[in-house]
Amino acid sequence: MNKADLTEALASRASIPKVRAANYINIIMGTIQDALVTGEKVTISDFGTFTVSQRREFVGHNPKNGSEIRVPARKIPVFRAGKGLKESLNT
């Protein structure tokens, strides 16, 4: 399922126009992104938690020529599924 499919599903279930559904999805995604950028944790009950994790710097290898390259430290988004989501997948 991609963003267009999600928009269509929301529009169908809520009986709203697709444009409004797409707007709501964009607002939710933007709000989660803004919270993560400021270092906040986003928890949606029974669904899961979005957090930011720090990856440390490491030495990698260029697959084309085998030379060593330094991969800088970076932040990555992490999603951890909640109890309700896990249970729904395993029933």
Image (cartoon, grey):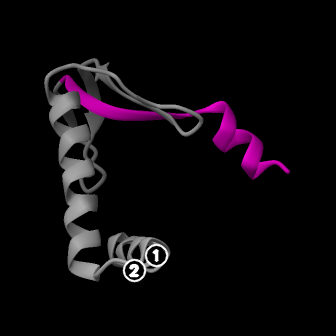
Where is mark 2, residue-wise? 8
Could you say where residue 71 lies in the image, as x and y percent from the top left? 20, 31
Kind of residue at badge 2: Glu
Residue sitting nearer the eye, 74 or 60 = 74
Residue 42 belongs to magenta span: no
* Residue 23 appears in the figure: yes
Left or right placement of residue 88 versus residue 43 in this view: right
Kind of residue at badge 1: Ala
Residue at the front extreme of this rendering: 15
Residue sitting nearer the eye, 77 or 22 = 22
C-alpha gap between disc 1 and disc 2: 4 Å
Callout 1–callout 2 Cβ contact below 8 Å: yes
Residue sitting nearer the eye, 41 or 69 = 41
Where is mark 1, residue-wise? 9
Residue, x 29% and y 32% (percent of image)? 76
Helix, strand or loop for disc 2: helix
77 versus 89 height, above or below: above
Left or right placement of residue 41 versus residue 9 in this view: left
Extent of the magenta region: 73-91
69 versus 62 height, above or below: above
